[in-house]
Amino acid sequence: MPGAAGATLNLLSPTCRTQLGDWAHSWGGAGRDEGVEQNSKYKTFGRLLASCCAWLLRRDPDRGPPSSGSSSCLSVFPVPPYTIVYFPARGRCEALRMLLADQGQSWKEEVVTKEAWQQGSLKASCLYGQLPKFQDGDLTLYQSNAILRHLGRSLGLYGKDQREAALVDMVNDGVEDHRKRCGHLIHHNYEEGKAQYVQELPGHLKPFETLLAQNQGGQAFIVGDQISFADYNLLDLLLAHQVLVPGCLDTFRLLSAYVARLSARPKLKAFLASPEHVNRPIFGGRKI
C-alpha cells in the first residue's frame, strides 16, 4: 500500500497488519455483488486507517507502538476515559496533567469547590477521605503517586528495565519528601518558616542536580534516556519553586537546563501556556 497509509501499516503490530489486510481483501473482492458500494468500503477502510494514525500520534515516537498480543486490531485504539476529580488548583494533580498532556492523552476534569467538599458527602465516599480521585475506565484510584505509577506502567513511562524502574521510584520518593516539606510550609508555617525554608532549599535540590550529572552529564532525563513519570513530578515541583523562591535554580546549572528542556517539549509547552494551567492556582488558596 503506497504513501502514508502504507507507512502507517508498517508501524502497526503484525496482528493488526494481518487483520487489516484480510479486511481489505474481503472488501475489495466483494464488489457490487453483495450490494455494497465499493466507494463506501473504501471510506470505511479509510476511517480505520485514520484510527490507526490517531493511535500512533498518541504514542511516543521514540518508543513506537506497544507489542501485539490482542486478537483484535481495534483493541489497540482505545481512548482512555480518564477523569481527574480535584480542587481548582495545581497541587497534587499538575504533574499528572503534564504527563497526560505530553503523552497526547485526553481527560475530563471534575472540579470540586471548597463548599462542595465541606458538605462532606464526597469526602466520605473517598477511600482515604481526600483527593485527588482518578478514574481510568472502571478503575478508581486514590493517592497521587499511585496514580502516577499506574500511568507510568500503562504508558511506558517507568524506565526500560527493572534497574531504571528502581531509580525512577527512588527519584519520585525524593520528590515526594520535598513536596511534603513544601506543603507544610504553605499550609502551616508560611510566615514564620519561609526564611528557613529558603535557606535549606539548596540542600534539598542538590540530590536532583547530582542525579542529572550522573546520567549522561545532565543532558537527558532524570533516569535513563527516555522520560518517566518521575520527570513530570520533578518538573512540576521545580516550576512551583521558581514561583515560590525566584532564582532558586540559578546555582543549579543542570536543573535549570533540565526545566527549560522539558518545558520546551511541544505538547508540554502548549499545556504550560494554556489558560487552564496558567490560571490554576499553584498552591490552592495560598497566594504567592
Image (cartoon, rainbow, N blue to C red):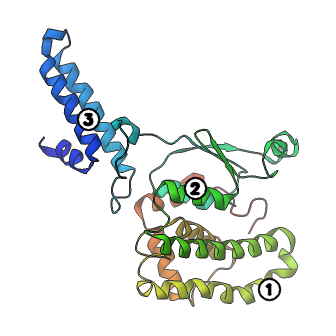
Sequence order check: which comes first, mark 1 or mark 3?
A: 3
Is 50 above or below relative to 132? above
Tell me where residue 67 appears, x and y as whole percent. Answer: 35, 52
Q: Residues within 10 Å of mark 3 (few under 14, many from 20)?
A: some
171 shown above or below 252: above
Q: Nearer the observer, disc 1 or disc 3?
A: 3
Three-letter amino acid code of the residue under disc 2: His
The mark nearer the N terminus, 3 or 2, is 3
Secondary element at image label 1: helix
The residue that label 2 is drawn on is 150
* Circle 2 crowding by C-alpha within 10 Å: few under 14, some 14–19, many from 20: some
Look at the image and tell me whether residue 278 can be seen. Answer: no
Residue bearing the label numbered 3: 19
What is the x, y in percent for residue 2? 11, 43
Q: Dot 3 lies on which element?
A: helix
| CB under 8 Å between discs 3 and 2 | no
**Crowding near pointer 1: few (<14 within 10 Å), some, many (20+)?**
few
**Three-letter amino acid code at the position of disc 1:** Ala
**Residue in view at x 63 percent, y 71 percent:** 237
Which residue is at 62% across, 76% downward? 242
Question: Would residue 229 be found to the left or right of residue 89 on screen?
Answer: left
| SS assignment at label 2 | helix
Distance in Å between CA atoms under marks 3 and 2: 30 Å
Q: Percent position (x, y) of residue 85?
A: 68, 46
Which residue is labeled 1 in the image?
195
Q: Is residue 73 above or below residue 177?
A: above
Amino acid identity at mark 3: Gln
Residue at 25% across, 50% down: 11
